[in-house]
């Protein structure tokens, strides 16, 4: 039995463009247009899951996908940094940001650490390994990173070294207790 999971990152939103910790904003017009133009380009799937964020739900809708939001697939909880740009946080809390980026167990913002999100997403990925067929999941970029770190058993420090562009597909296929990875395919009009 082979499980295939295609992780789709959300289309662009103001917070993505501004390097701002997600604040629940909607997709921007360009993101909606690109997602709609890619509708129909994804393979048929037995299941569709979503991060519960607005931008993931809107991306799925624009792609013509009807999915189930799952709390386990939520983006990293940035606590009190939510809605602020990384530049703003760096200006007021440079040491905290430095610790957060260097130590996967650190969560100076009061939310989740990198370890927390990787373990949460990893548990969800482990349950999917025993599911036959294809799953599509429209998820936050940090969920894609966490899934890759878990699937390839990478050190947690690798989390920050994985770039996940908007509206791309990353595919994991698993069987016999291991995952294979196909990285960042852009979604395009069929």
Image: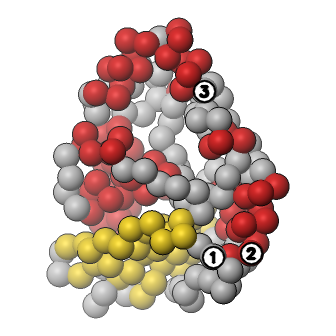
Location of mark 1 (residue): 188
Location of mark 2 (residue): 37
> Measured along the vertical axis of the image, is residue 75 above or below residue 65?
above
Give yes or no for contact between labels 1 and 2 (Cβ–Cβ under 8 Å): yes
Location of mark 3 (residue): 85
Quarter where residue 177 is shown = bottom left
Report the label total.
Answer: 3
* The furthest residue to the right: 29
**Left or right: 190 as drawn, with respect to 176:** right
Q: Is residue 38 visible?
A: yes
Q: Badge 3, how many Cα within 10 Å: few under 14, some, many 20+?
A: some
Give yes or no for contact between labels 3 and 2 (Cβ–Cβ under 8 Å): no
Q: Badge 2, how many Cα within 10 Å: few under 14, some, many 20+?
A: some
Please tell me whether mark 3 or mark 1 is closer to you in this view: 1
Q: Which mark is residue 133?
A: none
**Earlier along the polypeptide chain: callout 1 or callout 2?**
2
Percent across and percent down for residue 43 are: 55, 87
**Left or right: 101 as drawn, with respect to 56:** left
SS assignment at label 3? loop
Give yes or no for contact between labels 3 and 1 (Cβ–Cβ under 8 Å): no
Q: Nearer the viewer, residue 114 or 19?
A: 19
Q: Nearer the viewer, residue 127 or 187?
A: 187
Q: Nearer the viewer, residue 53 or 160?
A: 160
Q: CA distance from mark 1 to mark 2?
A: 7 Å
Q: Is residue 50 visible?
A: no
């Amino acid at each position: 039995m082979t499980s295939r999971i295609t992780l789709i990152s959300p289309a662009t939103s103001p917070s993505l463009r501004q390097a701002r910790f997600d604040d629940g904003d909607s997709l921007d017009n360009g993101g909606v247009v690109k997602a709609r133009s890619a509708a129909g380009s994804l393979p048929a799937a037995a299941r569709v899951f979503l991060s519960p964020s607005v931008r993931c739900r809107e991306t799925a809708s624009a792609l013509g996908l009807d999915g189930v939001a799952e709390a386990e697939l939520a983006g990293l909880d940035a606590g009190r940094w939510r809605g602020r740009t990384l530049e703003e946080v760096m200006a007021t809390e440079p040491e905290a940001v430095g610790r957060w980026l260097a130590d996967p167990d650190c969560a100076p913002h009061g939310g989740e650490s990198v370890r927390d999100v990787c373990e949460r997403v990893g548990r969800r990925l482990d349950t999917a390994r025993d599911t036959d067929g294809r799953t599509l999941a429209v998820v936050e970029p940090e969920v894609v990173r966490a899934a890759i770190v878990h699937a390839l058993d990478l050190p947690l420090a690798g989390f920050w070294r994985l770039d996940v562009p908007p509206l791309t597909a990353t595919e994991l296929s698993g069987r016999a207790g291991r995952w294979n990875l196909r990285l960042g395919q852009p979604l395009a009009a069929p």
